Image (cartoon, rainbow, N blue to C red):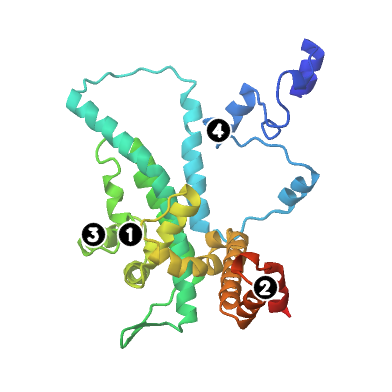
Amino acid sequence: MFELYLKLYKGLNIDQVLDTYYNRDIMLSNYEICRQSRSDNDGDLLPGFVLDYQGQQVLKDFKLTGITKAEQDWYDEYKASEMSSDSELHQDHKFKLYFVTNEEYNKYIQNAVVCKGLTGNATLGIWTFSTLLNLYKAYWETNKGLYVKKDRKIPLVQITNPEIARLEFEFIRLTQELVINGIKHVQNGSADFAPYALNNIGDKKYEKLVRHQLLTKYGLPSQLIDKLFFIIRFAQDNKDMLKACQNFFSLYNKGRFPVDSTALDHWSNDIVEHTHFGSQLKELFEIKQQFENTMIDEEQFLSELLNSDTLSGLASSEGTGSNLDFSKVVVNYQL
């Protein structure tokens, strides 16, 4: 449409205005589309795009599965709450002014800054938590529900897919309500979320508070809360499974290499093999594995070559090492 507009009203070709190659994925939109989509237009949230025929067919046949009724109801309620502001925009407003001290102002700004900074990490926390639950379930199945530690066999709690879905959903709620919405809170900011940070949930000093809130405010059954505590503590104890999940996203989402990669090295293949987010990198890991295997094969080849009688024999027959024809070495070695 923009190309047609330029042609009709400006007498210009689009190539004279835009580099069409480097801007081929950009959609130019008018104000009305942005307003109706209710997007804040910060770049990543604009829900405006045009699908080709194949994409439209995929969208036509798409059905959202794996979402519980409770989760759908929460999304619908949240959307309705956001949309409710529409009517308020068309009313006359009377504003009441409040006196704010410098101390209060600094506190409000500090809370907002802290929460804004935690939003990205909290989102990664959702992915990490989901990955951890998937990884734990796979570990339970592989080890037949037992955790061998030194000379002891410790029975593991079993968790089902519906229970995983419930825990994932409640963790999303916690993140939205206590971190992201915490940007707007003037009392505690993100402090209310601290007990639910993945490194803190298993801490004994938070257990009473977390258990009470999950039971009363979020309606989680006591048995499922017990499983949550067990899984988090187990993941911290078992070769740093939790740390490995955190490092996985730090590395592949943020590009930050862990200071100590021991945990990630131990669990990375399992994360790729048994979790949703890890599976997105499966092809990358296959390439990485092929490269590592090639390096090992080449090192072994050179090691065997340099220690073989073939090399010594050719060196003697051809004179000094500087005149050695390595093409003959390779041919003879392969023969």
Whole-Å distance between the Cαs marked 2 and 4?
A: 69 Å
Instruction: State the residue lying farthest toward the front.
Output: 319
- The numbered disc on residue 43 is 4
Kind of residue at disc 4? Gly
Instruction: State the residue lying farthest toward the bottom.
Output: 151
Q: Which residue is mark 1?
A: 214
The part of the image, by quadrant, that contains residue 7 is top right
Point out the tag, 3 or 2, that comes first from the N-terminus: 3
Whole-Å distance between the Cαs marked 4 and 3?
A: 38 Å
x and y percentages locating residue 183 in the rendered image: 35, 37
Location of the C terminus by quadrant is: bottom right
Q: Secondary structure at mark 3?
A: helix
Q: Which residue is mark 2?
A: 318
Point out the tag, 4 or 3, that comes first from the N-terminus: 4
**Pick the front one: 250 or 197:** 250
Location of the N terminus by quadrant is: top right
Whole-Å distance between the Cαs marked 2 and 1?
A: 80 Å
